[in-house]
Amino acid sequence: MSGWTFPRTEVEGISLPRMLIGINWFMGYCHQTKARGKFNSEYMTPSRIADVIEVFVNEAGIDCVYGVLDEWPKLLTGIAEAEQRVGRKLVTIATPHLKSGDRQEDLDASRRAIERQAAIGASFCLPHQATTDACLDRTRRRIRWMDRYAAMIRQCGMIPGLSTHMPEAIIYADETDLDVATYIQIYNAAGFLMQVEIDWVHRVITNARRPVMVIKPMAAGRVQPLVGLAFVWATIRPRDMVVVGTQTGDEAKELIEISRSILEGRPSGVELQKTRSKGSVS
């Protein structure tokens, strides 16, 4: 390891780095085009995934992967290979899609999905946004069935949280004292995929009773890392975390150094990309 460790926080007794490793760029979920996503998915082999994770761990002790699922063997193989290389177990956060509804068959299907995440060794289980936001009841200011999901997650030995694109979900979970330990919320300087203005989401995050993991800080590649990371690190709390995605170890090194320079209040040591048009400012 480089000797420097990324600042850490704690969620229900588990130490987590404030920068978490996201998986969208590993799996092809680029939020751009089908062709780009196909390339990303085919390019990112288990070994290349392990290469990226290894850099995060060795450069800054970033040892948590967000977004794992039992149905993605490529990702699980990459994580296992990275664990072998670095000689330590990684913390993983599962984000399964659960079956909305209170019929017994819906509950049984959800329990099976949760049990599968426990079987792959996930420490946290945050029902995916597609589940959370479908259950959101704005009229009654609650998240239907989420209390049952949280209980199932506890029974399987994992820590519950929830993933959302709707800032109301955090407010309603806090108001109803839902048994969750952390939240996932989209947050970026471009407002990409955010459902209300940036300042409103900022207030929700600031007022949240639990630590918040913010996702898409660089708006899926639409915002430069310096801009995206400077914004989130300057406007979240010391207890909150940022999820980032990369495809190469060099990208991981850049994001770590840019973030470190922002947190330390100094210029970044990242070398800028040079083109002919920048000759006069080089």
Image: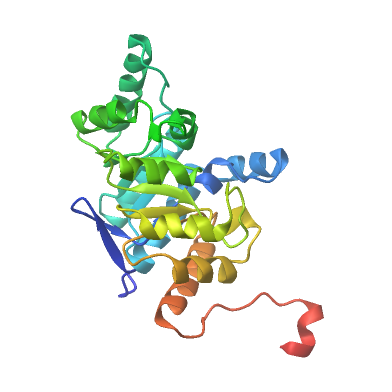
Scheme by which the image is coloured = rainbow
Location of residue 237 with respect to 24 vertically, above or below: below
Q: Quadrant of the N terminus?
A: bottom left
The quadrant in which residue 116 appears is top left
**Residue found at the far front of this picture:** 139
Number of on-image labels: 0
Front in this rendered view, residue 104 or 259: 104
Location of residue 109 with respect to 76 vertically, above or below: above
Asked whether residue 101 appears in the rendered view, the answer is yes
**Which residue shows up at 60% across the image and 40% down it?**
42
| Relative side of 54 to 41, left or right | left
Q: Position of residue 150 (x, y in %)?
A: 28, 32
**Which residue shows up at 38% across the image and 41% down it?**
172
**Which residue shows up at 74% across the image and 88% down it?**
281
Asked whether residue 77 appears in the rendered view, the answer is no
Q: Position of residue 261 (x, y in %)?
A: 45, 79
Q: Quadrant of the C terminus?
A: bottom right
Q: Position of residue 34 (x, y in %)?
A: 70, 38
| Relative side of 128 to 17, left or right | right
**Residue found at the far right of this picture:** 277
The quadrant in which residue 236 appears is bottom left
**Which residue shows up at 55% across the image and 54% down it?**
247
